[in-house]
Amino acid sequence: MSESHSFSSLPEPIAAEGPPATSESATAPEPGATRTRPWIALVLVGGVAAVVGALVATAVTLAVTRPQPHEYVVSVFLQQDATDEQKAAVESALDALEPVERKFESREQAWDNYRKLFKDRPDLLAAGSLEAMPESFRVRTKSRVFDCALLADARDLAVVDKIQVIQRPTEDEAGAEIACG
């Protein structure tokens, strides 16, 4: 018993349009067709990578070389006849500095500090007196640069005799007095 199988149920092959393919026509593009250029994609990726790398390098450089904030000490010396209301107005005006520390120095505290500072200089001790010592506010603040405009409200008060701003020294830089006219 031999069975015969008929392959008539298999689908017919689909004929391609156009001329039959040859090995030459399979690799060469047809005339007028655009060729893809893989090197363009590589150039674009490389360019984007270079830009991103430059941005990252710039950000790191700025973060590392950015100057650290300086510490400033602002001394506001008051006239001899300052009232409590005037002292409160000066203290309020100094809030613009966003102080890290603020303290008021009375005439007595100023005299004690003067005597400690010049204990080995009898000539300077004899020249000073409690009555000559001014009351003052000492404010310590930090910033990259000192903005003298922040002192405008304090400077405009009639009770303020003098304002002195000192940039404290660091390991890398000497201290300095800041002229805030």
Image (cartoon, grey):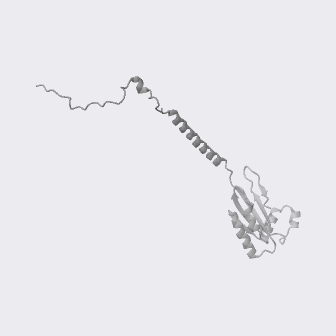
Q: 21 and 6: which one is in front? A: 21
Q: 73 and 13: which one is in front? A: 13
At which x and y percent is residue 59? 62, 47
What residue appears at the point 39 percent right and 23 percent down from the top-left corner?
A: 23
Residue 160 visible in the current orientation: yes
What residue appears at the point 54 percent right and 38 percent down from the top-left corner?
A: 44
Q: Quadrant of the C terminus?
A: bottom right
Q: 42 and 71: which one is in front? A: 42
Say left or right for 152 vs 17.
right
Give the tally of numbered discs: 0
Q: Is residue 112 above or below residue 170?
A: below
At which x and y percent is residue 32? 47, 31
Q: Quadrant of the N terminus?
A: top left
What residue appears at the point 72 percent right and 68 percent down from the top-left corner?
A: 93
What residue appears at the point 74 percent right and 64 percent down from the top-left corner?
A: 151
Say left or right for 128 vs 22.
right
Residue 137 visible in the current orientation: no
Say left or right for 25 vs 3.
right
At which x and y percent is residue 123? 89, 63
At which x and y percent is residue 6? 18, 28
Report which quarter residue 77 is drawn in: bottom right
